[in-house]
Image (cartoon, coloured by chain):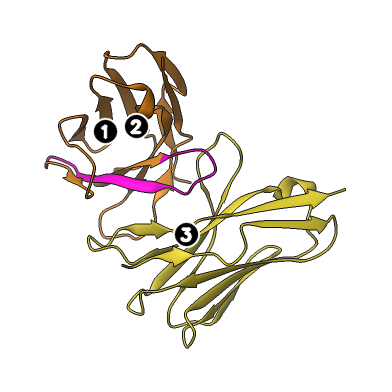
């Protein structure tokens, strides 16, 4: 099967600091990776779509300068939350898909808490 | 705007009974639909998918029904078990970028 990992699984940071979340496809090449945010008892909301080697496409209302996405290789994408604030506390989930395929394979998520 | 929504936010069933989770979608151009299961603190897990040229697809203990006329999707779980307790999301590829759009989710609770 297609496995996607995320690191860290949980992170606590202080307000004003930056935190980086990694998303890796372990056994396939992910030409496209997606980043979602999920607040408690809510659905997944797409933040951005990134294709390997290209700039990410951000959804409306998502600040690209605050949520920096890098997809430098076919197996790794990173999301950096810059100058984090308590309202950024959420569950961040990545997914990855192969070229030309609909299927998205989801990571286990990262719980971010900003104090 | 385009959206995928659910009729019921919560569903409680007795162990061994069948469960039916419903979903309505709005984008008539959507041609691929997926059901995901999400356990607490984990990422979504693929359950079953269906393309728009089908109206029914069966998996192990699960069946997805698609009614394109009324833009309705359902997930049926046979002989529901405690391990089925989770939040279930329907999703379709209806976004402007061809991306996945998730419905609100239904929490399924299975009573022993």
Q: Earlier in the sequence, mark 1 or mark 2?
A: 2
- Would you place residue A56 above or below residue A80 in this image? below
Residue lying at 32% horizontally and 14% vertically, measured from the top left: A15
Position in image of residue A112 (x %, y %)? 42, 24
Real-space Cα separation, disc 1 to disc 3, in angstroms: 25 Å
Number of numbered discs: 3
Whether callout 1 and callout 2 share a subunit is answered yes
Q: Chain of mark 2?
A: A
Helix, strand or loop at label 2? It is: strand
Residue lying at 43% horizontally and 18% vertically, measured from the top left: A11
Magenta range: A38-54
Looking at the image, the residue that sits furthest to the right is B112
Instruction: Output the letter for the chain in orange.
Output: A
Instruction: Output the letter for the chain in yellow.
Output: B
Assess whether mark 2 and mark 1 are in contact (beta carbons under 8 angstroms): yes
Which quadrant of the rendered structure holds the C terminus of chain A? top left
Assess whether mark 3 and mark 1 are in contact (beta carbons under 8 angstroms): no
Which residue in the protein does label 2 denote?
Answer: A23
Which residue in the protein does label 3 denote?
Answer: B103
Q: Is residue B3 visible?
A: yes
Instruction: Answer with left or right where residue B38 lies relative to residue B97.
Output: right
Looking at the image, the residue that sits furthest to the left is A54
Real-space Cα separation, disc 2 to disc 3, in angstroms: 24 Å
Residue lying at 61% horizontally and 57% vertically, measured from the top left: B9
- Would you place residue A63 above or below residue B1 in this image? above
What label sits on residue A77 in the rendered view? 1
């Amino acid at each position: 099967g297609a496995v996607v990992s995320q690191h860290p699984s949980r992170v606590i940071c202080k307000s004003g600091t930056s935190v980086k979340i990694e998303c890796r496809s372990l056994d396939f090449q992910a030409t496209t990776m997606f980043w979602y945010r999920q607040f408690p008892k809510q659905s997944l909301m797409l933040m951005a779509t990134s294709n390997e080697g290209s700039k990410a496409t951000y959804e409306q209302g998502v600040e690209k300068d605050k949520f920096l996405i890098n997809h430098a290789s076919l197996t790794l994408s990173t999301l950096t939350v810059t100058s984090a604030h308590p309202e950024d506390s959420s569950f961040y989930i990545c997914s990855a898909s192969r070229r030309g395929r609909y299927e998205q394979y989801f990571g286990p998520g990262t719980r971010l808490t900003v104090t | 705007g385009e959206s995928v929504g659910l009729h019921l936010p919560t569903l409680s069933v007795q162990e061994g009974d069948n469960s039916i989770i419903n979903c309505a979608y709005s984008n008539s151009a959507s041609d691929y639909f997926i059901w995901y299961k999400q356990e607490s603190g984990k990422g979504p897990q693929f359950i079953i998918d269906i393309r728009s040229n089908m109206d029914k697809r069966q998996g192990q203990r699960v069946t997805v029904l698609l009614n394109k006329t009324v833009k309705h999707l359902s997930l049926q779980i046979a002989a529901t078990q405690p391990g089925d307790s989770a939040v279930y999301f329907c999703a379709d590829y209806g976004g402007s970028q061809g991306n996945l759009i998730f419905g609100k989710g239904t929490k399924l609770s299975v009573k022993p």
